[in-house]
Amino acid sequence: MLLIDPPYFSGFEAIPLEYQDKLWLDALPWYYKNEQNQANAVVICLHGFTATPYEVRPVGRACFKLGIDVVAPLLPGHGYSLFIEQRREFSKITKDIMLEAVRQEIIQARKHYDFVGIFGHSMGGAIALTMASEGLVDACTVTAPAIQLPLRAEILIGLLSWINISIPKNSDNFYNPNYLFENSKAALVLQRIALHS
């Protein structure tokens, strides 16, 4: 597998020992394998910007109930438990790193499955659309794909992306483990992914 920095964590592989105590428990990638998967199919579920595989678990469970295997990687820069690591790793992501991580997960899926579908939410949706446009998957479904950012975000990215700052954001009123800040450099990556999709 290609070395990606910051690393992504595949749902098909165990977390390397040196990262096991650095990630939120609810941020860990997951893999639901249905022993009765007669279709030999898998759906790769991609989380959104600042989020974790936890947020796509309901979609994964629904697919699994239909007899389809499901895997959810932890995308680069995401899922770290300590604030200092969150800021450091998140500010290192690039559009190419994010896209390559998902391509690697698709390669892993193709080793085991005849049919590879992809689901993405928000940033994960924009990435899923890119993978579909590259012809790498057999089916694609998205929710709220980040293909156009709000005007306010576009303006702030233009003004602040040249410096590495983190801006606090409001937390959700429900449990969804994610970073409680937006990073100026990482936001530029989100914008580039949106424009690329």
Image (spheres, rainbow, N blue to C red):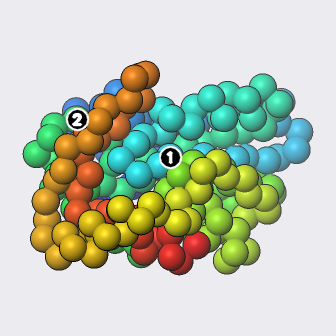
Q: Nearer the viewer, mark 2 or mark 1?
A: 1
Mark 2 and mark 1 residues within 8 Å of each other at the beta carbon: no
Residue 189: quarter of image: bottom left
Check disc 1 and report its element: helix, strand or loop: loop
Q: Which quadrant, please, contains the N terminus?
A: bottom left
How much space separates mark 2 and mark 1, taking CA atoms? 17 Å
In the image, is 9 to the left or to the right of 183?
A: right
Give the numbered dot on residue 47.
Answer: 1
| Residue plotted at (75% across, 35% down) | 63
Give the numbered dot on residue 163.
Answer: none
Amino acid at circle 1: His
Q: Provide the residue designation for mark 2.
A: 81
Please tell me whether residue 192 is drawn above or below residue 88 in the rendered image: below
Task: Find residue 174 and report its horizontal and vertical position in percent.
Answer: 43, 22
The residue lying toward the viewer, choosing from 187 and 72, is 187
| Residue plotted at (16% across, 37% down) | 82
Furthest residue in direction top, as rendered: 174
Q: Which quadrant, please, contains the C terminus?
A: bottom right
The residue lying toward the viewer, choosing from 138 and 196, is 196
Label whose residue precedes the other's in the sequence (2 or 1) = 1
Task: Find residue 182 and report its horizontal and vertical position in percent.
Answer: 26, 51
In the image, is 181 to the left or to the right of 125?
A: left
Residue 52: quarter of image: top left
Please tell me whether residue 116 is drawn above or below residue 68 in the rendered image: below
Amino acid at circle 2: Ser
| Residue plotted at (89% across, 39% down) | 38
Is any atom of residue 91 visible in this view? yes
